[in-house]
Every structure is written in C-alpha cells, then in structure tokens.
Amino acid sequence: MCGFIGYINGSDGPLSDASIVLKDMMERIRHRGPDSDGTFESDAAMLGFRRLSIIDLTTAGDQPLYSTTGRYVMLFNGEVYNYRLLRKELEEMGYTFKSHTDSEVIIRGFEAWQEQIIERLRGMFAIAIWDTEEEKLFLARDMFGIKPLYYSNHTTDGSFLFGSEIKSFLDHPRFIKEMNVDALRPYLTFQYNPLDESFFKGVYKLKPAHYAWVKNGEVTEHAYYTKRFDTKAMKNSRDSLETYVEHTKRIMAESVEAHKISDVQVGCFLSGGVDSSLITALAKPERTYSVGFEGHHDDQFDEIPYASVLAEQLGTHHTNYFVSEQETFDNLAHIIYMLDEPDANYSILPLYFLNRLAAQDVKVVLSGEGADELFAGYQWYYPSKLADNYRKVPKPIRQFLNMLVPDRDKPGRLKSFLIRGVTGIEDRFIGHAISWPEDEVEKLLKPQYMTGPSVKEVTYPVYAEVQGQTDLQKMQYLDWHLWMPGDILLKADKMSMANSLELRVPFLDRKVFELIEGLPDQYRASYDGSKIALREAAKEVLPEEWAKRPKAGFLTPLREWMRRDPFYSAIKTAFQSDIAKQLFDTDQLLSALERHKNGEDLGHWVYTVYALLLWYQDYFVEDKGRCQTVDALA
C-alpha cells in the first residue's frame, strides 16, 4: 500500500526547481508511505512514490519500477492477490524478476499484454505507467474504486497532474486551485460529492473499472469491466438456497485467504455485525480492534460488548478504544482535510480513530466494507409485502388515493406510503444517504450557486443502464456506482492511509462479485430480512446470534454533541462566517442549528454544511500551497 504523484509538463516546459516541487508534492502524501520513497525525473514528466512496505520488504520492492528495456516507468498503489499465478505465467513466457512483489508482476504484465493486464488483476489498485518513448501516460483503477486516482490539467500551461490524493497538487506552482461550485448542490443532498469532477474545479476521479490513456493532455477513458446482475442466469437458475450458501462459504473463505497475503502482520476490525465477524472468523487473526464512545457504554453507539465477546470466543487479542467528545472535536478539521473533499458521513469519525488504534500494532487490516452493497444488507433494500400488494391495485386508484391525502412539508407515514405507491424506484431512491432534501437545498443555497446537477441528473443516467431490472437490482446498481466509490470506499482509503495503515476489503473481490452477478434477488433480500445467503453461510463459522444480528451501522453520538459546546459554539461561528454568508441563507442555517439544539433532529443537515465549511477553511484559507488560487466565489 502506497501513494504516488506525478505530472507531465505543459507548454512552459520543465520547472526551474522541478526536483524540489516533486519532493514537496511527495511530502504531502508521506502518510501513505512512510517507509521509503523514489522518483523518476525527465524533461517531459516527473514521478514520485511513497512506500508502505507490505510484500517483499527489501529495497527490491521500491518504486518506480521499470520495464525490461526501461521504456515504461510504473507507479502502483494497492495489492494484487493473484500475482503469484500471473508471475508463473510470465516466467513461462521468458520474463525474469528481481523482486517478489506484486508490483513487478504488473509492469512485466504490461510489457507482455499492454492494457489487457488490467483485466487479469484480482485486487485493489491505482496504476500509472509512463511511456518514455511515445510520451504518453497509462492510468488504471480497480473495478470497485477501492483505491483513489485523481487527475487534472487545470493548470496555467496545460501541465497534466495525477496522483493518489488531491492535496499533493497544491504544491505544483502551475496548478490552479479553484472550488468547483457545481459540486455544492448535489453534495448537500447526497452528503458526499457524487460527480466525477471533484470539489476542486478541473480535478477528476478516474472511474472505477476504467483505464485511460493520456497524450498531449487529452484523456481517453475505457471501461474494462461492467458490474451488472446476470438476470438471464438468475431466471434460468434452478439452484437452491443451500447451493448458493455453499458457494458463498467457499468463495468468501477463499477471498479472505487471498487477502491475508502479506509479509507483515494482518489484523481485523471487529464490530458486533455479521460482516466483520465473518471475516474475522475466517481470517483467524492474532489481533482485532473496536471503538466505542466515552459515556456511551452499552448503548446504541457501542458495539464493543458484542465484539469483545466474539473476540474471546475466536481467541484473538482484542483491543478496544473509547473516543471522547473533546478528542473528536480536536481532530475533526484534520479528518476533513485528509478526505480531500467534504463528506458528511458520521461514521468517518470513529473510523479514523479505529484505524489509528490498529496502526499502533499492525500495517494491514481486513474490514467488512462492501458486504451490504453486494449482498443487500441495507434496510431500504428489503421488499415490503404490504407495498408489493398495494402496487397490484390499479394505478388510477392509487393515484386517486394519493391525491386525497394533502401534501405536507414533512409527509407522515400514510402519505409517504401513498407516494411510494405511485412513483417508480428511480424517483424515490437516490442512494444510501439523504441530507438536505432537494427542495430545502433550493431555499438554502444562494441562487448563483445552484449551478450543479439536480438529483435526477445524477441518478437517471445510472438507472438508464439497468432498465427492466427489479427494484432491488436497480438500487444496488446505483449504490455500486455512486455511494460505494463516492463515500464508503473513499473514507475507508483516506482514513486508513491517514494513519499509514493498509485496509483490505475481502467482500469487494472479483470472485465474490462473480457470485453476486447471478445470485437471485430472494437470496439477497426478502420479506424476512437481508443478506440471506451470506447470513446462512456465516452460521457455519459464527454463533447464530452473530449471523442473525441486524445491521446497526457505525453509529456515533455526534447529533447529541452538536447540541452543546464545544461543537455548538464552533458550528454557530462557522455559520456566521463570511464564506457561509457568501454561499448560504445563513438565517436558514442558524435556524436549523437552534431547532436541532432544542430537540428537533436536524443534526445531519447541520453537520453537512459544517463539514463543507471546515473543508473550505482547510484548503482555501489555511493551506495556500504553491499553486495558483482562483476565487470561484468572487
């Protein structure tokens, strides 16, 4: 696990202090690789690498790595779990190796198969390969988007920048730092930025399951894998639940075993839920880790008792940590900074401290991200027998009944049920999280900043790719392409790497997904619950109580904390700041804060804006860098 940065010079040619600039850019991401560094420097391109040594701890694994002839120069962040099989195939073709790393297998594979090597990789990765002869760049990202990869030519001379984290761009003197105001509108509703363009104007995220060629500043992207359900296979399948359970047990065990490949110790995150518990039971690590919150022992915010009991049964050395309110407040600005973009997911906060805890002992952890998205673990995926029966009523009658009950700003349960009965899933599901409803965003955000896409403009193109499929399939497909890479995996990478820790996700594995593609709906979510096949498989290695435990999420008491100091006063000050007045109707903000303080649950609304304002303070007020700054709000 590592981080990299690079740039291709533009029309103004090499920088006079290019080596110093590269070093400064690399220093920005030292946390991703504190063990060693390496560079490639030429008049055309500059590449920098920071290494966190996991496989082959010798200097033979240092990067950049070169092709046999020296034509290709590679930077690689991630892990490839089938590298030994690929190495054997390449050796049979006559290729030789100087190290025992997975990264050397990639560069040799690129020599042999060019971009087709990407389709052969099983793992998580971001890859950059510079062709010194044709002066073009190859970029690639894993199929789920586990590892980040950003790029930009928003520069004064067309220089092209790329890397693992946006913050490294800030020390390039030709990079133009400018807020992307088009991200504001969707962020306020989704709680994260669902766009390909980041919150920095002209800085883009390479799409998951894509590779790109860059030549003369032009980026040409190609998809190499399509994540979809095989509806034909589902329809024709006569396999029983028991058969799929056996497949799930076998494939998950094999995936966990593959994800344990390491030359350093591997630990596990352990909560009270089935996902991390299953991985821990299969991995049998020496060490496991959990976090809770001071003052919230044995309540809804504390899964430590469940984790501790299971750890004892599994025989792991278990470590708990209780996060305090003050500690969270003191670290919040740093946490937001490490994300690169604002994100209002509460679970980011305990995740940061959980990674910090584990990093004291190990360099690698296994975690349960992706299980809910693949095996259908979220409550909104559950089908409703009442709703399904109601939809059998002729649509004109359903429309009439909906009209009888008046619209309200906050519809009650009956009205919400009637609305769902006359609207398709495309019009009522936007993904995991909703912060500010879209109509409230129109009241909150100043009109000149309502330039970004609407919710439907974000979601409809994704839904259009799966027309004719079931509601469950559509919801999962949307979450695979928006919520998972835009929020879940972004926070997992940034919070682990902020603590120089490699986080691996065995559920997000090519072989696991190949199982999911053909897994019938009723074996994922049914009237009786979620993750049907997975829970049945878990019963073989876990106590039944853990296999059946309902999803709780990574709950935090932040809503409660925001009702008192130090959070309340800090948020109020931020809502009265010049930047808040520039962007928002601050009367609306302050009203939401006071209503929340007085007992109304508007915590998510409040925190979504506060996280944004902290991000702006981090990147546009305090961190000047060496880049050119443009005030997009002027």
Image (cartoon, grey):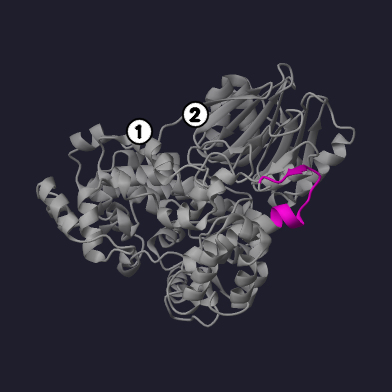
Q: Position of residue 230 (x, y in %)?
A: 29, 34
Q: Residue at x 85, y 35 (%)?
A: 18
Residue under label 2: 119
Relative to residue 373, is residue 322 drawn left or right? right
Q: Is residue 202 magenta?
A: no
Q: Element at badge 1?
A: helix
User: Is 255 or 392 nearer to us in this picture?
Assistant: 392
Separation of disc 2 and disc 1 at Cα? 22 Å
Whichever of labels 2 and 1 marks the residue nearer the N terminus, that label is 2
Q: Is residue 627 magenta?
A: yes
- Secondary structure of the residue carrying tag 2 is helix
Q: Which residues are magenta?
A: 618-632
Please state if 382 lies on the left or on the right of 207 as rendered: left
- The percent position of residue 574, horizontal first and vertical second, equals 64, 66
Q: Which mark is residue 23?
A: none
- Answer yes or no: is residue 227 visible: yes
Amino acid type, mark 2: Glu
Q: Dot 1: few (<14), some (14–19), or many (≥20) neighbours within 10 Å?
A: few
Residue on which disc 1 sits: 465
Foreground mark, 2 or 1?
1
- Residue lying at the far right of the rendered structure: 16
Observer-nearest of 284 and 564: 564
Question: Which of these two is toward me, 556 or 514?
Answer: 556
Whether residue 363 is visible, yes or no, is: no
Q: Amino acid at mark 1?
A: Glu
